[in-house]
Image (spheres, rainbow, N blue to C red):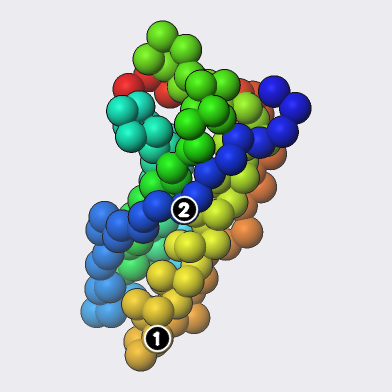
Amino acid sequence: MSKNPAFILKGINTEEFALIEEAYNQFEQSGCQFSIKFGSLPNKRIIAVIVRFTFDQKKTPFLILELGCQFEVESQSWEDISARNNVVLPVDFARHLASISLGVARGVLHAKTESSVLNQFMVPAIDLQSIIKEELTIIP
């Protein structure tokens, strides 16, 4: 496939959000854990990307965001990427959907922490090329 499949961002869901200000100490070192998952709903031509960020200090979380983006793939493009109920995402397309999901997460995190001392924490830059190195096969 020479170009990315045609798609639209169909939905955004905040799966989990926790803001635990009392667990945050401004004098302690903070860390951030990140994970990303891909899924699909073949009967609706949906690719789901779920990103999760957990900000913590001494392994105690103080800010958690898990967000899912649903992308509806155009029917001809869906035929191009699906085979025997599996969906195969070309590496550049998987990175593109992940990048959009990270951008959405940045906006949601900012909006949800706007009136909090924890607003200083942002979704960090993520090197998707080092995480998504080859095409992804999603088995629903």
Most extreme residue toward the right is 2
Give, as a three-letter code, the residue at label 1: Glu
Locate the C terminus and report the quarter of the image it occupies. top left
Is residue 102 visible to us here?
yes
Image-based side of 59 in relation to 7, left or right: left
Is 31 or 2 nearer to us in this picture? 2
Image-based side of 48 in relation to 6, left or right: left
Image-based side of 19 in relation to 79, left or right: left
* Residue ID at (24%, 79%): 22
* Residue ID at (31%, 68%): 62
Give, as a three-letter code, the residue at label 2: Leu
Is residue 136 visible to us here?
no
- The residue at which mark 1 appears reads as 114
* Residue ID at (26%, 55%): 15
Secondary element at image label 2? strand
Is 100 or 44 nearer to us in this picture? 44
91 up-or-down from 126: above or below:
above
- The residue at which mark 2 appears reads as 9
Locate the N terminus and report the quarter of the image it occupies. top right
* Residue ID at (47%, 12%): 83
